[in-house]
């Protein structure tokens, strides 16, 4: 059993485990009255069929924890081209918040490839970006050549006190077990009256978030060992405790939900009409590809679930 206070463990992911987990959540929803008898019996039949086809999903994957620097460096070349419904749902809400803020100096903390930094620059902000991944920063610099980008961790921002008017930190705190340190840094670099916009990932069930697994060659690992980015789902109360203790005021909080249904009857993702290639048994499990193997269970398990949580905080004026 994993100890949440210990170092992240080596994990084992099997595609069938994810599919059976979806079936289990779907059955719990049926048990609570959301679905009828036929739906429940159909889940039983599908579970039997999945168990009988276990070998088709491969032997599963063991992976060791890796740093966000290594993980996102390996991800950087393809990050912007990959399907990421989480970002597609989060981004419009964050941009609406940006549109209502005064122009000033904006820090994109854990800026990645610069998706929020580029929008802030288009609005007229002077943009600073910080990220631990050189590969992601290279992409960000291409998008925002006028930006000022730094390789650093968000727990130790390379900025002076009271030096920015806006901080945004998007889908990054999920990789940190403790979020108090980043919030202290955000408060330190913000001027009085400054704004903080934070978005973060939500899990399928409470604190369950499937870590992203990377192949060894992408990590320059000659032994081909696979690695994963640790992920921690934070309680709403954790964000509030971190922010309110520093004087932040809550201006807005939203938890946008995933589309319902998530897939159509052919297993295509609602919204973009794409069906991903089937899971390769030799590859690490890819949950979005696996969804089409159990369409009804996927739609039931993800029904009404929040995709992310989005906060808008402000420090009191000086």
Image: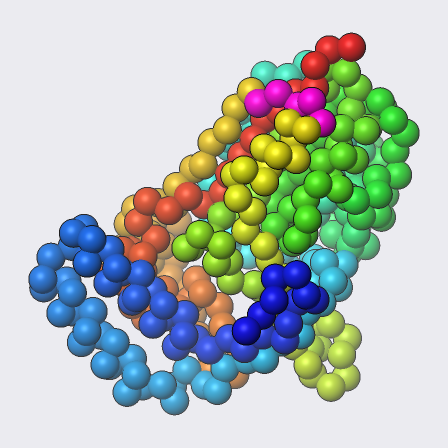
Residue 252 percent location from the top left of the image = 52, 24
Residue 147 percent location from the top left of the image = 81, 34
Q: Residue at x 20, y 69 (%)?
A: 43
The answer to whether residue 98 is seen in the rendering is no
Q: Residue at x 64, y 72 (%)?
A: 9
Decide whether residue 38 is among the magenta residues. Answer: no
Foreground residue, 206 or 193?
A: 206
* Residue farthest to the top, as pictured: 318
Foreground residue, 98 or 30?
A: 30
Is 23 positioned to the left or the right of 210 in the image? left
Is 193 positioned to the left or the right of 285 in the image? right
Could you tell me which quadrant the C terminus lies in?
Answer: top right
Is 203 positioned to the left or the right of 246 in the image? left
* Residue farthest to the left, as pictured: 37
Q: Residue at x 88, y 39 (%)?
A: 158
Residue 260 percent location from the top left of the image = 30, 46
Q: Which residues are magenta?
A: 246-250
Q: How many marks?
A: 0
Q: Residue at x 58, y 70 (%)?
A: 2
Decide whether residue 249 is among the magenta residues. Answer: yes
Foreground residue, 94 or 208?
A: 208
Could you tell me which quadrant the N terminus lies in?
Answer: bottom right
The answer to whether residue 35 is seen in the rendering is yes
Indicate how the structure is coloured in the image.
rainbow
Residue 243 percent location from the top left of the image = 65, 30
Q: Residue 163: which quarter of the image?
A: top right
């Amino acid at each position: 059993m994993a100890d949440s206070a210990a170092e992240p463990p080596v994990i084992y992911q099997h595609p069938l485990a994810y599919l059976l987990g979806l079936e289990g959540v779907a059955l719990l929803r049926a048990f609570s009255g959301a679905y009828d008898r036929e739906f429940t019996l159909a889940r039983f039949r599908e579970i039997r069929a999945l168990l009988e086809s276990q070998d088709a999903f491969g032997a599963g994957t063991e992976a060791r924890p890796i740093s966000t620097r290594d993980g996102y460096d390996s991800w950087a070349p393809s990050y912007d081209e990959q399907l990421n419904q989480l970002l597609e749902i989060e981004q419009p809400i964050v941009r609406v918040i940006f549109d209502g803020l005064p122009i000033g100096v904006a820090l994109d903390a854990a800026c990645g490839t610069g998706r929020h930094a580029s929008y802030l620059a288009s609005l007229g902000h002077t943009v600073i970006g910080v990220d631990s991944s050189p590969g992601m920063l290279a992409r960000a610099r291409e998008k925002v050549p006028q930006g000022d980008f730094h390789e650093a961790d968000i727990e130790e921002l390379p900025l002076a006190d009271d030096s920015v008017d806006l901080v945004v930190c998007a889908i990054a705190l999920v990789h940190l077990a403790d979020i108090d340190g980043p919030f202290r840094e955000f408060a330190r670099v913000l001027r009085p009256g400054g704004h903080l916009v934070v978005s973060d990932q939500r899990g399928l069930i409470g604190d369950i978030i499937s870590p992203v697994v990377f192949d060894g060659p992408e990590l320059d690992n000659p032994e081909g060992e696979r690695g994963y980015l640790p992920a921690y789902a934070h309680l709403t109360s954790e964000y509030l405790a971190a922010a309110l203790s520093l004087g932040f005021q809550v201006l807005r909080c939203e938890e946008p939900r995933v589309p319902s249904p998530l897939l159509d009857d052919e297993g295509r993702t609602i919204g973009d009409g794409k069906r991903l290639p089937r899971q390769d048994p030799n590859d690490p499990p890819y949950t979005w590809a696996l969804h089409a193997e159990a369409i009804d269970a996927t739609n039931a398990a993800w029904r009404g679930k929040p995709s992310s949580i989005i906060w808008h905080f402000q420090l009191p004026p000086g």
